[in-house]
Amino acid sequence: MATLDINGATHEVDVAPDTPLLWVLRDHLQMTGTKFGCGKAQCGACTVYINGSPARSCIMPVAAVQSAEITTIEGLAGNAAEAVRSAWTELDVPQCGYCQSGQVMAAAALLESNPAPSDADIDQAMSGNICRCATYVRIRAAIHQAANDLRSAGDA
Amino acid sequence: MRRLERQLAETSQPHLGRRRFIAATATVAGGLMVGFRATSSAAQDEAAGAQASAPNPFEAYIQIDSEHRVTVLSAHMEGGQGIYAGLATLVAEELDADWSQMQATGASGNIALYGNMAMGGAFQLTGGSTAMSSSWQRYRQAGALARALLVSAAAESWGVPASEISVEKGVLAHASGKTGQFGEFVAAAAALPVPAKVKLKDAGQWTYIGNEDLRRPDTARKTRGEQDYTIDVLLPDMLTAVLKRAPRFGATAKSYDADPIMAMPGVVKVVATPRGVAVVAKSYWEALKARDALEVEWDESAAETRSTAGLMEGYRTEADDGSGVLVHTVGDAAGALDDAAEVVSADFEFPYLAHAAMEPLNAVGRLQDGEFEIWAGHQMPDYYQATAAQILGIAPDKVKLHVMMTGGFFGRRATPDADVIVETASIVKAMGEGVAVRVQWSREDDMTGGRYRPMYFHRVSAALDGAGKLSAWRHHIVGQSILKGTVFESALMADGVDSTSVEGVDNMPYAIPNQSVSLSTTDVGIPVLWWRSVGHTHTAYAVETMIDDLARKAGRDAVDFRRDMLRDFPRHLGVLELAAEKAGWSNAPPEGIHRGVALHASFGTYVAEVAEVSVKDDGSWKVERVVCAVDCGTAVNPDVIRAQMEGGIGFALAGIVHGEITLTDGVVDQDNYDSYKVLRINEMPSVEVHIVNSAEAPTGVGEPGVPPLGPAVANALLSATGERKRVLPLGTRV
C-alpha cells in the first residue's frame, strides 16, 4: 500500500513498490493526462512535478515518492501554467497533442524559474521532451509569448 | 491526379433529386444528440417516384446537440494532421455556424458515407494525404443541407418565409426580431424532407475557408491532458495485455511455460496469438513484468536472419547486374548517355526507418452480447472490421469500430496485416464475452516491431549534352515492395511493379528527352510499410541532389537550371520561384550560412524548400532556417497547412540526420529513442511557410512537406563542404 499526495489530495493505492508512478496514475487512479511514450525517461511525455520540479514518472518507483508533493497536468495551475496554455492555444501548438501534457509541464516549469528565457534556455529546458510531430517552432514561439504575457501582467 | 479530379467532379452533385428523409436519432448522455441521418429506404424512394440508388452521401456527417454544439463526424482519422479542423471548417462555412460551437469526432461503419473518394470510394482510409480532397465536396454539401433544413424548421416555427431568415455565426434571425440557435430547431429540421437542391457558396463568400484566424477545436483540451487517445480508454474491469514477440521476423512460438507466469501478481491469463504470446494482467506494469519473465521457445525455421549491411551489399550487386523491370522509358537513355558531354553517376543508400509515433501501438477491445467493439487509431476501418470479424467468427456488422484521436501515425496505423487489431481480437476471443482488454505495445515493441520504411539502393546516371542541357537520366532502384504479399497487391500493383517504390522518379517534371527507370524488387522478411510520403522519402533525395550536381557540372545556378526545365509545369515553377524569392536566393547568404534548394511534388501538392545550414569547425552542423513554398490548391486552413509544413520539415530532418534501423543477424539493433534518435527542439530550424494563392481544388498537406527537405539540406551541405553525401543518415558531423 502506498500513500501519495497528488494535486493536493491524498490517494492510497495497493501496488508493488517498484510500480512506476506513471502507471499508478494511469491504471490505478485513472488520471490519464500523463502519457506513456518510452518507459525509459527518453521522451518526456510522462512529465510530472515532484516537489515542484519536473520529473519522469515512467521511471519513478512509487515507493520513492510517498512523501513527495506530486503535480500532474490535471493539477497544474498558476500564472505560468495558464500563460503557457493561453499561448499554446493562440499559436495552435499541438498537432496530435500526445506529448503536449509533458511539453506544457516542462514549459511552465521553465517560466517559473526563468521569466525571460532565451532560445538557448528553451532548447536546454525542452530538449528532453520529444514531439514527433515536430511542433518545436511553435513551442519556442509560444514560450516566448507566454513569457511576454507574464511580464506584461506583472507590469500592469 | 486525373482520377482524383474525375471523382471529385462525379461527386459534385450526387443524387440531390432523390427524396430523402432525415430522422432524429441517437440520444447520448448530456443532452439530446440529433443526427442528420438520412434514411433513403427503397420504400421512401419509390413513394416519391425516385429510383433507389447508391447510399446517401449525406448520411451522418453532422450532429447538433441541445447546447448547440455541432459535431462533425469525420471520415478520416485525426492524428495531428488537422483534418478534424479541416472538415469542421467546411461544415461551418456552409452551415454559417460560429467557429466556437464546432468540433469533430471519428466515424466509421458505412463505406457509402465515409469511403475515401480519392481512392475510388470503395473503402475507408486515412492516408495518401487524401482527406481534404476526398471530403471537400461532401462535407460542404452536408453543411449546406443542414443549414437549409434548420432554416425551414425555423420558418415553420415562426410562420415566416424561409427566404426571409438569415443565419450568421450560429444564429438564425428574422426581421420580426425572432432569433434562435441550431439546437432549438434541429429536432424539427431532422424530420423535414431534404431539399432537392442546395447551392454551395462561391469562394468570394467564404468566411472560414482560407481564414488565418481559425484555431483547432481540440487545442485547449490538449494543453490540459483532457484529450482522450486509445491509451486513455477506460472500460470497467479492463485488463491489459502485453505480447512477447519473436526476436526475429518470421519466427513463431513453439512452446512456452505459462505456469510460473500465472503465479505472478496481477496475471490473469497467458494467451497464444498468431503474433506472439500475450500476458493478460490487471495492469500494464504487472503485464510487462510477467511478459519479461515469460520464456518462449521460438521456431526460427522461417525467420529472417540476415543483417542489413549484408542485405545492402546484395542490393548493390543487384544494381551491378543491371537487371530489373523497366518501369518508365522516354527516348533512348543509354544512347544519350553514350553521346553525352558530361555524365554524373552516383549510388545512394537509404536505411530502414521507424515511424516512432509518440503513442505506441495499442487498441482496446471487448466482446459483449455477440458484438465486438474496438477502440484504436483506425486508418483502415473496413479492413480492420472484416479482419476482426473473421477472427471472432461474427458478422462484420457486429464489429463496431471507435476511431480514436491518435498520438501520431505517419502511416503506421494502416497495416495490411492489421497487427494490433489481430492481437486484440485474438486475445478478446480467448478471454470471452464481457472482458475488456487493452493491448499496449511498449516503446521497444513499437521500435523493434517492423513495418519500416523499406531500405533502398539507387544507382543513377545522368548526362548533360554539349549545350549544358540535361539530356539523359537512367535510374535503377533496388528494394522491397510495400504492397507485395498484401491484400493490396492485386489491386495496386501492375506487372510486378510497386508504384510506391518508384513514385517521384518515374514522373519527374523536368524536360529530360531520354529517361529510363527500372526497379528490382527484393525478397526480404523484414516487414515494411508506408512512412510519411512513402516512396518520395527516397526518390526526391536522389533526384534533387542529382539535379543539383548536374547544375554545378553545367556551371548553372540551381534555381535557374531547374527553371529552364519546368516551362510546362507552372505549379512546380511557382513554388520554386516563391521559395527562392522569399529566401533571398539571388542574394549571397549571410556569413557562415550555406544554402540549398529542392523541389518536389507529391500527393498532388507542390513544395519547394530552401535550407540554410551552418557548419562549425568541429564538423558539427545545423539547419538554421528553412523557407518553404507550398501549392496545395485552395488553402482551406492556412494555419494547419503551415503547421504541416513545419512538422513535415522536422519529421524529414529527423530521418535524414538520425534515422536508421539496422538489423544484426535478423535482430533489430534499435529499441527506444536513445538508440533510434528523432529530432529534438535544439535541432529544429526556424521555418517560414509561404502558401501559393490558388483557386484549384484543395490537395493534401500531411506528407508533401517531407520530400524536399532532405535534398535541400544535402545541397546546402554540399555548398558548405564540397562533399556530396549519398548514404543516409547524414549524421550530426560532416
Image (spheres, coloured by chain):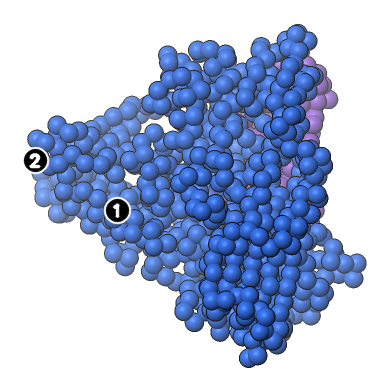
Chain colours: A purple, B blue
Residue drawn at x 54%, y 40% as measured from the top left: B486
Q: Amino acid at mark 1?
A: Thr
Label 1 packing within 10 angstroms: few (<14), some (14-19), many (20+): some
Q: Position of residue B367 (x, y in %)?
A: 49, 18
Q: Position of residue B77 (x, y in %)?
A: 49, 42
Report whether B607 appears left or right of A43.
left
Q: Which of these two is toward me, A22 or B722?
A: B722
Q: Give the mark nearest the N terminus, 2 or 1.
A: 1
Residues under labels 2 and 1: Cα distance?
22 Å
Residue drawn at x 84%, y 66% as measured from the top left: B734
Report whether B370 appears left or right of B707.
left
Q: Which of these two is toward me, B663 or A9?
A: B663
Residue B401 is at least partly visible in this image: no
Q: Which of these two is toward me, B67 or A28?
A: A28
Q: Which of these two is toward me, A40 or B555?
A: B555
Residue B49, label in figure: 2
Q: Position of residue B197 (x, y in %)?
A: 18, 52
Residue drawn at x 73%, y 17% as measured from the top left: B255
Secondary element under disc 1, as helix, strand or loop, is loop
The number of callouts visible is: 2
Residue wearing tag 1: B11
Q: Position of residue B327 (x, y in %)?
A: 55, 62
Residue B175 quadrant: bottom left
Is B74 rendered above or below residue B535? above
Report whether B483 appears left or right of A76.
left
Report the quarter where the N terminus of chain B lies: bottom left
